[in-house]
Amino acid sequence: MKMKKWTGLLLAGCMAAGALAGCGGSSTGSTQTGGGEGSEELTWKIGMIGPLTGPVAIYGTDVKNAGQIAVDEINAAGGINGYQIEYRAEDDEHDAEKAMNAYNTLKDWGMQILAGAVTSTPSTAVEALTAEDNMFQLTPSGSSKACIEEANAFAVCFNDPQQGTKSAEYFAEHFPDAVIGTLYDSSTEYSAGIEANFESKGAALGLDIADVESFTADNNTDFTAQLNKLKSAGCTYVFMPIYYQEASVILQQAANMGFTPDFFGCDGMDGILDIEGFDTSLAEGLMLLTPFAADAEDELTVNFVENFRSAYEKTPNQFGADQYDGIYALKLAIEKADLTPEASVSDICEALKTAITQIEVDGLTGTITWAASGEPDKEPKAVMIKDGAYVSIEG
Amino acid sequence: MKKILSQMDQTSRNDFITYGMVIGAFAVISILQALGILSSQIGGLLVPLCVYSIMAVSLNLVVGILGELSIGHAGFMCLGAFASAFFTKCVGDGMPSMLRFVIAILIGGLIAGVFGFLIGIPVFRLNGDYLAIVTLAFGEIIKNVMNSLYVGRDANGFHFSLSSANDMGMDALNGEMLINGPQGITGTPRNSTFLIGILILLLSLFVILNLIHSRQGRAIMSVRDNHIAAESVGINITKYKLMAFTVSAVIAGFAGALYAHNLSSLAATSARFGYNMSIMFLVFVVLGGIGSSRGAIIAAVVLTLIPELLRPIASFRMLLYSIILIVMMIVNWSPASRAFMEKHKLNRFLFKFKKSAGKGGK
């Protein structure tokens, strides 16, 4: 009897070891076959990490899909330096630890360049790993400053301080007499980061910020208290550097209580027109500062939006546009550095680090150049919602 | 070895198997790692697996042995994580990294333990499910406080604020943000290794299993089974409840420290350190067979691995994960599967401790 039990235990142990070895073995096996195939058909392997499930999945899926469009276009036109691109997306559920798991999974796949992660906290967590492996990382929309702290990390989007400052400058230029109230989410780094810089820059520029209200992710269903305070402070403009889900609720509640200031948001507001069941007439007149406007009439934007609509049946948002530009930036930088996929991950990173500062991408989100710090330089566009669509405001 | 085992009584043999399982897993993984056939996916999961196993063992002490329901254990982990990462950030390079990490772990455990003790004092004077309510609130409060806490340091010393970074009055140019509100703590060195994780797991197991078999442990279990009877024989109920709960909180703090030093960005979001995470730990304990440390570890490892290993099926993995969870819950406890285990002697290996615990209990 006892013998049997110990044999069982031993067998179970062997099985477990076998299973683990299997995991390891099969994946290294696949990399090897990947390399083997490579001698005939070498490819660029670009990975992407983002929230494909969960509350902010709309950002992840848009980034994934827009990246796919860029990759398909480049592949159809002959690839980068004659090599085709393989593009793979992994889910991080907007969580730092899951993002690290996603990164390791992509590494097993043989990723050479990371075009991710989509949101800030995961992006910062992954950055520590890419810095360790010296892998080039270009985040489309990780907006916290910590996302680009390492030398190997670059961003396509504005970072939060930049957005706050640019918004304050926009106000000072266009509505210097406005009585401004702000309403922000103090529990997300995105919102808190923009607000802090908007306030300090606004004070420096002499803006009249009459009231500052906040909420957290745990009480984001009833905003009447905050709206009442903003109303009694006499605000004519309400600056909301928040994500679009909460904004849709706020607009509804403000309309119900007859509070009708001009609402102004940042790039997180992009996507508000795609919420199911949201009365888009409430968003009429909403302004947002974003580098991308889906209704712009230049050929590049028109083609991109058309391709995106026909493939995924929705209008792409700014996050997707950032990824599209990011993929093209990688293409230009790789061509500039004259690389082939045979180079090691670390060599690619070293070459791209300098190459990306020498290129200029004429993309969907404007003309972008990069500084060695990882920050992009481009002009934000102000758009307004008119008749259920984004329309650029000139000037 | 067989001889030694057969000479042991049943409980020590059980403990031996639990230790053996952990050490065996460590040995196998280390060999695979040394041979270089471990994928980076599994390699990256090793520390999280240790963290979740430690949390499962820790919560098992409260739920399985003490018989109280705690649904805010993520709050203790959160405290341990922030306390240890804060210490590491403050010290910086002023200390060898290994020594700094050990002290950070101890601080994480200490802070979590102090809060566990303080919460326990009023709650354990009451009978009923009060602990569940209080810990639930505690977990949420801790998460929200960490989310709005700003701490910075400049030449004039430390600055705190609970509203915004601008209100701290810190010298913004030369100062350094230590805890930056919802952004949390970034740039914590990644000191956690699989070896340290396994050592903490073994230490936790050693403390808990020895506690269970001690005089105090028997008192704790008697409180669980019948508090009136326990009180009538002169057992100080509050004291023993407090003892088990504080030990559990300290171990959760260790897990938090391990967690914080595995990630370079530590933030208290709703998904992370919210009540969902506490419920996940509870699922580990329930699925592992309430009261079995070994079962809790196995459940933690399996449930952490499944969603990662299901990555190839992309969008369906969340759906499949839930289905697997439901199936496991049903199959694990159904009379038919128990009879099958009984018949094929599988229960002797997996369910022995639970049975003996049950017997002792009822």
Image (cartoon, coloured by chain):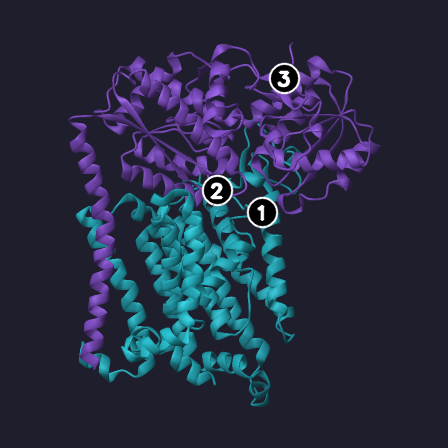
Chain colours: A purple, B cyan
Of A341 and B213, which appears nearest the observer? A341
Chain to which the residue tagged by mark 1 belongs:
B
Residue pictured at 60% horizontal, 66% vertical: B132
Three-letter residue code for mark 1:
Met
Q: Which labelled disc corresponds to residue A53?
A: 2
For residue A256, above or below residue B47: above
Q: Which-is-in-front pick, marks 3 and 1?
A: 3
Which percent across, then down, holds residue A375?
Answer: 47, 21
Residue under disc 2 on the same chain as residue under disc 3? yes
Q: Secondary structure at mark 2?
A: loop
Residue under disc 1 on the same chain as residue under disc 2? no
**Local crowd at mark 3 within 10 Å, few (<14), some, or many (≥20)?**
some
Q: What residue is pinned by disc 1?
A: B146
Which residue is farthest bottom? B233
Three-letter residue code for mark 3:
Val
Which percent across, then down, holds residue B92?
Answer: 44, 40
Q: What residue is pinned by disc 3?
A: A391
Which percent across, then down, holds residue B264?
Answer: 43, 41
